[in-house]
Image (cartoon, rainbow, N blue to C red):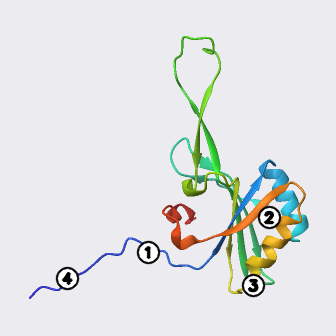
Amino acid sequence: MMAVHKIIDDFYEDSFTLLAIHSSMEDYAIVYALNLCLKGNFKRSAEDLDISDHISFPIFEWKDKANENYWTLITNNSLQEDNLVRSDLFENEPSFTKHHLVPEHKEADFLLKIEHDTSNLEKDTVKQLLAVPRIITAYVLDVDQLKSKNNLIF
């Protein structure tokens, strides 16, 4: 009799909280606002998250050694310039395709990933984010319901 081995698709089981942030701010401006409201120290990562040759997402990270938390802010949107040859009124204008890191939540502009051990951190963080004037809304996403959670492994 042969033994049956099953391979599980999801190898990544690290616990983290994912917050969606809606804001019209540029990434550098929201990082500045987060550093003020969370008393953090977000810095741009040396490398972006590259999904393919032309699709990349900038990453900002903060290692909170005092509370043993690791914070990552990443944009949920990326624009890719298309190389289309057009012969109409807009032939000299570039066209862009928008890509999303988490397509299930296209409306979210930024994603804040928090790797932590404490349980009440999400509620306090959402409350602090909502106090920032140019953040429209912020809320916790259920990571287990995401089909594209493998995109969040970086």
Q: Circle 4: is it few (<14), some (14-19), or many (20+) Cα within 10 Å?
A: few
* x and y, in percent, of residue 105 in the image: 60, 56
**Residue 75 horizontal side relative to residue 38, left or right:** left
Identified at 61% across, 51% down, the residue is 106
**C-beta proximity under 8 Å, tags 3 and 1:** no
Of tags 3 and 1, which is closer to the observer? 3
Q: CA distance from mark 2 to mark 1?
A: 28 Å
Q: Circle 2: is it few (<14), some (14-19), or many (20+) Cα within 10 Å?
A: many
Q: CA distance from mark 3 to mark 1?
A: 26 Å
**C-beta proximity under 8 Å, tags 1 and 4:** no
Quarter of the image holding residue 4?
A: bottom left
Mark toward the start of the polypeptide (3 vs 1): 1
Label ID, residue 42: 2
- Residue that label 4 marks: 4
* x and y, in percent, of residue 6 in the image: 27, 78
Q: Amino acid at mark 2?
A: Phe
Q: Amino acid at mark 4?
A: Val
- Residue that label 3 marks: 120
Helix, strand or loop under label 1: loop
Helix, strand or loop under label 2: loop
Identified at 72% across, 70% down, the residue is 71
Of tags 4 and 2, which is closer to the observer? 4
Mark toward the start of the polypeptide (4 vs 3): 4
Q: CA distance from mark 4 to mark 2?
A: 47 Å
**113, above or below 79, in the image:** below
Mark toward the start of the polypeptide (4 vs 2): 4
Asked whether residue 40 appears in the rendered view, the answer is no
The residue closer to the viewer here, 89 or 14, is 89
The residue closer to the viewer here, 12 or 90, is 90
Q: CA distance from mark 2 to mark 3?
A: 21 Å
Q: Amino acid at mark 1?
A: Phe
